[in-house]
């Protein structure tokens, strides 16, 4: 096929004429205007006489307004800047049969008040022009000069005595001396707000775009910042400035974040009362100051119009005022509206002609100015609203809501641009309804329409249906002050950059950088990582790469980077091969793309052209790239419910990130990573589930560069694998887009790579988080917990180090029962160790249980224990009776790691105390046994106690005052023995066990060697430690009692030797007692064999 | 006993058993092994022990069964004993050990299915031109497909594979580095992805072919086929391709292997060369965005042994 290579079928000059974005530019060019006119439909009609508009169309409106018997109409056309208000108003002007009506059309022109007044004057027939002489005279002063004059006038209006009828907040202005503030030299020199307003009122050099000239909160914040420049202010002014300055602190952040002034007003609520009041004050007085600058009085305009209407009345004519943009009249707008709402029929004098007015306003003007004056709104007879509120900020444009309409709109301009002015004039003069179509005679028609598409025979070249609708959906005002999804936006943002530069096509440079206008936001001009890689790998020439990138981003479907085929035509990313050829670009598709039934293909699946279009098939034109047949893939259900626009937003974030910008909404992306991280096969990676829960939380997964990281964070580097992986993950989770096998395969490969890299990163992070020992090896958390709990189990007598290891294992994992080993009767370190590890042993045990569990799949059951590490630690402990080393550095205690820190602490406590504990206890047991043996003097426990009892009883029966404290102690000690079961009649089992133990100790060689320390500890554990301790102590008390009695008896005899009694019988009695006592004591103190 | 009948014997559990036996000098009474793997854990409530039902030890028994099936231990009624002279030092070397055991299996061995089913995935990806199907098939559909393509008459009438075995097969296949559980779908699914296994096998290949030597693509692929028989040129791949009527394409590399080779090249573990005018090249499976399309030579970079 022959494509229109380097061929532009229009000229820049023709395009410029057709593309005049201001509908009323060049009022003489009605041919161009009508050739590009697309009927405005779908608008809403309200107002007091809305029912008179029978059909909601431009024809319906025209019919209503031009009725001969209509005596008054105040018709407001509301729409965003560029939404077609002017176009509709001009269309009314063109179509208005002017017989009998004086129809005045006032265009936006340069947007200035002066220019608008001048235009009003000039549009009048010469007979009336003198009435308005003087209006709209050019000012001699410079803009800066007028600005100062405006500000000085404004300051005057702030004096409480300025107005005859006090204006809003008059007293407040006087209270704070605001006239002094606004008129201060420093404020006159430095405050930029008045100049900004004057600039807008002067048309902003033709770029006003229906912007309102109002003071706002940012202006007042700026005023507050001038405090330091204001010399010698009055106390009141100074105090007021300080109040403003304080409030400005809340305003600056919003200004920095580019929040619009009206939103800032809303957001700040009651936080800035002084600022808001000052804004109200300034705006309420602005018109007076403006009128002062212009040299017209508040009533002058009204009077001029009354004069005009009176003259027309005399002629029996109606006045029709078609005002494109009311904002152009700001400064005198109130007076103008007063004129427009004044009905001839309500005046008793009946001195004015009838008036039909149609006025264009923006939604902002409607809300901020008309609604503020309720009687104005009530007097709107027809309120035409061109769109609906689609978001917090803007209305849409009803007649461009459908993609078909967008394409149809663009097609009118494309067709007109291909015709010369004379061809258009001839067409218009002929009153033919259909605009001539240059495609009909074009040699390239067939191939061109095949590749680019057409609408009713008019080719879309160099656009396609997708490029028009896609770019339209991308349009955005970089300043955020207007919507760009308007007719004007389409012309300026899509058509003009191409049609005004046909040389780019002729030079083989299209799509050139000129099409990348600011209203197509940067993210929309980017392509996905896949496409970047594709271009990098396939195209060497950087300039060609850039053109391809533009083509793919703006013409193509970025989620369908694949080759498809229908009939003989191949498509790549939904762009026909012919488009590539026409633009002289490398064909990126794979020529081997074949229909779906053949194996191993790229683009073996077909898809329906998409840009989620609500257009019905009936409304669709044949420009749709020939969609290959539908695929037979199993339908997929997306894992997330991102709409196409939400997905696109996410992909734009990734693209910007790839371009080196900061990743937007990192929380969203980190959440995606968190979901993936938690789904990894942790146990296959060798990372216990317990550590997953401790080292990885949604809040600690961080993408590099998106926030401040500390040791808690699992930081993932912002590398290609992560960026590409997240992009593919988002696409696949949203259902995979519409891509076929080839594109899906790349996405799946990138997600698999992300998975692999995450696995490595997770293992590395776990290793990094695991504390190290002094030798640099990782600390075994499982080993430490196992050893701590094993030691506790043994020292509490719950299990023995000589039992089989499995029994130890089960016991140390089990909840603890009461100790049976009498730790309090053991060596100090024994009890001490248990006390030191008592507080949180349950947490250590729970940690261990979690660390070793290997559940089946995602089951919450324990499953099977990961026993290797624990068994190693237990066996080492049993062998060495030493705990393994502990980390050298302390573990930070967080919610997640508190139990790890506690385990390390307990391991350190146990390590310090457990070593040598078996031997120390062994020594102590032996010493006690030997002490007991000595005290028993070869008697049995029972007999020895009986002997002590006998002494005590005999002596106390003879000598009632003998050693009462010692004898009382003995009584207590004896009861302890009784309680312990050691004094049963005929010898108790407890006593027998103790005696057996004493026998064993007696038989031990001096330096007995156990086969292991574990055995020694097991031996310690079998010893009747408690009974031995009680007996040892009791015998000590018994010995003390006997000694005390002996001492007492000895002293008693000594005393008797010195007695004065000479009675023989007394002497005899004492002698008997002494014999008895001494005999008993001797019996206790001596062994049975002497 | 087999990996797909002792399904509760997952790789991590077998690794646990090996560690347990190693700690105990290579053998341990069977009862103790069971107790270690599924311990009786006493719970205390209100100061007294609460008796719970004795733990179900079948998971432990199946773990022993899986280890026996791999030839790693032997088990009698009262003893479990290691059969390894040297137990792997870590989980990664255990992976390699399991893989080498699977490589040694023959068609008569029930564990042969682990690699054979994976081979079925590889061939099916070739037939369907991608991997997407793998995450869309139900377990039943996977099992039916495997049986249809692999169950030859000489394998008896009993189904060699069923839906229940799918997750357990997936567990072993992912463990030895043949794929991943794909993170997109809500239910677990297998995505064939042999990067990890191939990265490991490069070391073995380098032992025979040498590091930093430019190898003809065919030499590299032929050597690789011995270590990864379920991929291109491998005996298992050839046999299954024939059974599934996939045309033999000597000069074209499968999608699964192509992906791994490209990523290993990107990571610098091997270097693929294919000058534009080279002849005798082997074609990689199409990849929309990757610059590597052909292989003339392959160099195994020494870095692979260190990374």
Image (cartoon, rainbow, N blue to C red):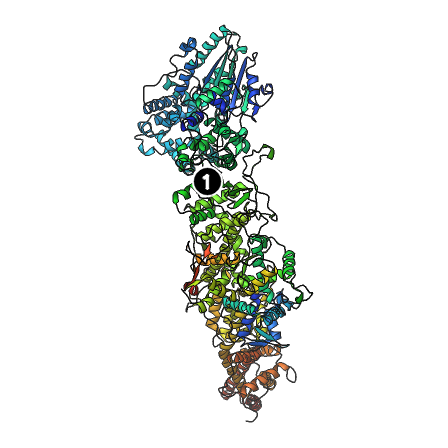
- What residue do we see at 69% from left, 65% from top? B157
Q: Position of residue A994 (x, y in %)?
A: 59, 82
Quarter of the image containing the C terminus of chain A?
A: bottom right
Quadrant location of residue A327? top left
Toward the viewer: A1040 or A396? A396
Residue pushed farthest top?
A: A314
Residue pushed farthest bottom?
A: A1089
Toward the viewer: A730 or A458? A458
Toward the viewer: B203 or A715? B203
Q: Can residue A402 be spotted in the picture?
A: no
Q: Can residue A92 be spotted in the picture?
A: yes
Determine whether A419 is above or below A1009 in the image: above
Judged from the image, the secondary structure of the residue bearing numbered disc 1 is: helix
Mark 1, residues whose alpha carbon is within 10 Å: few (<14), some, or many (≥20)?
some
Residue pushed farthest left?
A: A231
Residue indicated by mark 1: A581
- What residue do we see at 60% from left, 54% from top? B187
Count of picture labels? 1
**Which chain is home to disc 1?**
A
Q: Where is residue A239 in the image (x, y as percent from the top left)?
A: 37, 32
Q: Where is residue B297 in the image (x, y as percent from the top left)?
A: 43, 60
Q: Where is residue B137 in the image (x, y as percent from the top left)?
A: 62, 54
Toward the viewer: A730 or A606? A606
């Amino acid at each position: 096929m022959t494509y229109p290579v380097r061929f532009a079928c229009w000229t820049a000059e023709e395009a410029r004429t057709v593309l005049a974005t201001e509908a009323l530019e060049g009022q003489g060019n009605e041919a161009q205007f009508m050739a590009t006119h697309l009927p405005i439909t779908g608008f809403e009609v309200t107002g007091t006489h809305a029912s008179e508009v029978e059909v909601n169309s431009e024809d319906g409106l025209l019919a209503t307004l031009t009725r001969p018997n209509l005596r008054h109409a105040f018709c407001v056309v509301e729409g965003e800047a560029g939404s077609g208000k002017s176009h509709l108003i001009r269309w009314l002007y063109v179509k208005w049969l002017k017989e009998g009506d004086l129809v005045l059309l006032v265009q936006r022109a340069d947007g200035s008040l002066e220019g608008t007044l001048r235009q009003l004057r000039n549009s009048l027939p010469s007979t009336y022009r003198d009435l308005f002489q003087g209006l709209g005279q050019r000012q001699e002063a410079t803009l800066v000069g007028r600005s100062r004059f405006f500000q000085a006038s404004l300051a005057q209006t702030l004096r409480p005595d300025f107005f005859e009828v006090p204006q809003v907040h008059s007293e407040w202005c006087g209270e704070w001396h605001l006239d002094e503030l606004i008129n201060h030299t420093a404020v006159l020199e430095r405050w930029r707000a008045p100049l900004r307003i004057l600039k807008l009122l002067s048309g902003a050099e033709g770029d006003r775009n229906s912007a309102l000239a109002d003071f706002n909160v940012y202006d007042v914040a700026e005023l507050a910042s001038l405090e330091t420049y204001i010399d010698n202010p009055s106390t009141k002014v100074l105090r007021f400035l300080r109040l403003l300055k304080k409030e400005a602190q809340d305003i600056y952040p919003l200004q920095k974040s580019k929040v619009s002034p009206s939103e800032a007003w809303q957001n700040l609520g009651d936080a800035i009362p002084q600022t808001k009041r000052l804004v109200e004050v300034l705006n309420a007085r602005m018109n007076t100051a403006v009128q002062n600058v212009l040299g017209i009085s508040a009533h002058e305009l009204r009077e001029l119009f009354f004069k005009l209407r009176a003259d027309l009345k005399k002629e029996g004519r109606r006045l029709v005022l078609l005002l494109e943009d009311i904002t152009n009249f700001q400064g005198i707008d109130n007076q103008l509206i007063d004129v427009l709402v004044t009905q001839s029929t309500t005046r008793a004098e009946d001195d004015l002609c009838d008036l039909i007015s149609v006025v264009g306003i923006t939604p902002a003007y409607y809300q901020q100015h008309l609604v503020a004056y309720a009687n104005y709104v009530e007097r709107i007879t027809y309120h035409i609203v061109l769109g609906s509120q689609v978001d917090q900020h803007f209305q849409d444009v009803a007649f461009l809501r459908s993609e078909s309409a967008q394409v149809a709109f663009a097609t009118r301009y494309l067709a007109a641009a291909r015709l010369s002015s004379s061809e258009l004039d001839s067409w218009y003069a002929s009153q033919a309804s259909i605009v001539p179509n240059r495609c009909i005679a074009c040699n390239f028609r067939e191939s061109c329409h095949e590749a680019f598409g057409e609408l009713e025979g008019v080719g879309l070249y160099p656009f396609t249906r997708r490029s028009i609708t896609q770019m339209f959906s991308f349009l955005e005002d970089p300043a955020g002050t207007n919507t760009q999804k308007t007719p004007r936006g389409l012309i300026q943002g899509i058509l003009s950059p191409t049609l005004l530069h046909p040389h780019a096509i002729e030079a083989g440079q299209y799509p050139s950088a000129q099409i990348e206008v600011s209203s197509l936001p940067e993210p929309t001009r980017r392509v996905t990582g896949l496409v970047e890689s594709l271009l990098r790998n396939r195209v060497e020439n950087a300039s060609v790469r850039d053109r391809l990138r533009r083509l793919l981003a703006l013409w193509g479907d970025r989620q369908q980077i694949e080759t498809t085929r229908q009939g003989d035509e191949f498509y790549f990313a939904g762009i026909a091969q012919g488009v590539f050829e026409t633009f002289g670009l490398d064909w990126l598709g794979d020529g081997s793309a074949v229909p779906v039934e053949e194996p191993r293909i790229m683009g073996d699946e077909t898809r329906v052209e998409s840009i989620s279009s609500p257009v019905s098939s009936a409304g669709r034109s044949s420009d749709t790239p020939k969609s290959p047949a539908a695929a037979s893939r199993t339908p997929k259900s997306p894992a997330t419910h991102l709409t196409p626009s939400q997905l696109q937003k996410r992909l734009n974030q990734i693209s910007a990130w790839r371009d080196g910008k900061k990743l937007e909404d990192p929380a969203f992306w980190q959440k995606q990573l968190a979901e993936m991280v938690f789904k990894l096969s942790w146990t296959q990676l060798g990372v216990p589930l317990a550590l997953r829960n401790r080292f990885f939380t949604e809040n600690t997964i961080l993408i590099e560069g998106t926030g401040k990281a500390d040791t808690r964070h699992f930081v993932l580097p912002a590398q290609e694998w992560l960026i590409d992986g997240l992009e593919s993950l988002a696409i696949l989770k949203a259902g995979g887009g519409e891509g076929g096998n080839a594109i899906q395969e790349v996405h799946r490969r990138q997600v698999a790579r992300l998975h692999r890299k995450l696995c490595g990163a997770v293992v590395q992070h776990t290793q990094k988080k695991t504390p190290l020992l002094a030798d640099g090896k990782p600390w075994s958390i499982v080993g430490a917990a196992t050893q701590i709990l094993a030691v506790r189990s043994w020292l509490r007598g719950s299990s023995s180090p000589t039992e089989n290891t499995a029994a130890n294992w089960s016991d140390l994992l089990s909840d603890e029962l009461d100790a049976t080993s009498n730790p309090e009767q053991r060596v100090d370190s024994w009890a001490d160790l248990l006390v030191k590890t008592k507080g949180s042993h349950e947490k250590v045990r729970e940690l261990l249980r979690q660390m070793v569990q290997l559940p089946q799949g995602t089951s919450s059951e324990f499953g099977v224990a990961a026993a290797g590490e624990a068994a190693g630690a237990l066996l080492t402990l049993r062998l060495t009776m030493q705990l393994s080393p502990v980390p050298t550095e302390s573990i930070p205690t967080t919610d997640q790691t508190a139990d790890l820190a506690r385990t390390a602490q307990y391991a350190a406590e146990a390590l310090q105390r457990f070593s040598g504990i078996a031997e120390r206890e062994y020594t102590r047991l032996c010493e006690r046994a030997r002490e007991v043996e000595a005290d028993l003097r070869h008697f049995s426990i029972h007999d020895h106690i009986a002997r002590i009892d006998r002494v005590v009883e005999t002596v106390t029966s003879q000598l009632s005052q003998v050693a009462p404290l010692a004898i009382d102690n003995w009584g207590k000690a004896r009861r302890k023995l009784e309680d312990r079961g050691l004094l049963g009649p005929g010898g108790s089992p407890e006593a027998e066990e103790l005696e057996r133990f004493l026998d064993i100790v007696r038989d031990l060689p001096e330096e007995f060697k156990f086969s292991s320390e574990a055995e020694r500890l097991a031996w310690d554990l079998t010893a009747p430690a408690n009974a031995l301790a009680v007996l040892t102590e009791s015998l000590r008390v018994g010995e003390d009692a006997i000694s005390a009695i002996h001492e007492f008896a000895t002293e008693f005899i000594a005393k008797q030797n010195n007695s004065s009694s000479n009675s023989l019988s007394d002497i005899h009695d004492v002698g008997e007692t002494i014999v008895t006592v001494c005999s008993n004591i001797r019996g206790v103190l001596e062994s049975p064999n002497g | 006993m087999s990996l797909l009948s002792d399904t509760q014997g997952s790789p991590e559990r077998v690794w646990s058993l090996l560690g347990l036996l190693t700690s105990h000098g290579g053998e341990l009474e069977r009862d103790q092994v069971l107790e270690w793997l599924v311990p009786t854990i006493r719970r205390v409530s209100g100061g007294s022990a609460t008796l719970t039902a004795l733990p179900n030890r079948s998971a432990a028994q199946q773990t022993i069964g899986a280890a026996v099936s791999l030839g790693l231990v032997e088990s009698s009624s009262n003893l479990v004993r290691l059969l390894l002279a040297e137990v792997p030092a870590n989980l990664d070397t255990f992976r390699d050990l399991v893989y080498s055991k699977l490589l040694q299996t023959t068609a008569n061995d029930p564990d042969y299915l682990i690699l054979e089913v994976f081979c079925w995935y590889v061939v099916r990806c070739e037939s369907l031109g991608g991997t997407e199907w793998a995450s869309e098939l139900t377990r039943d559909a996977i099992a039916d497909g495997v049986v249809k393509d692999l169950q030859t008459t000489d394998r008896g009438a009993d189904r060699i594979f069923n839906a229940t075995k799918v997750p357990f097969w997936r567990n072993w296949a992912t463990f030895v580095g043949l794929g991943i559980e794909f993170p997109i779908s809500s239910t677990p699914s297998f995505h064939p992805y042999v990067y990890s296994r191939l990265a490991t096998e490069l070391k073995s290949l380098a032992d025979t072919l040498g590091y930093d030597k430019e190898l003809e693509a065919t030499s590299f692929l032929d050597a690789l086929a011995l270590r990864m028989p379920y991929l291109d040129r491998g005996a298992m791949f050839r046999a299954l391709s024939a059974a599934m009527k996939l045309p033999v394409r000597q000069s074209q590399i499968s999608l699964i292997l192509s992906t791994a080779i490209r990523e290993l090249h990107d990571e610098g573990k091997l270097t693929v060369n294919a000058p534009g005018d080279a002849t005798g090249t082997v074609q990689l499976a199409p990849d929309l965005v990757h610059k590597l399309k052909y292989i003339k030579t392959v160099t195994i970079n020494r870095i692979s042994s260190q990374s």
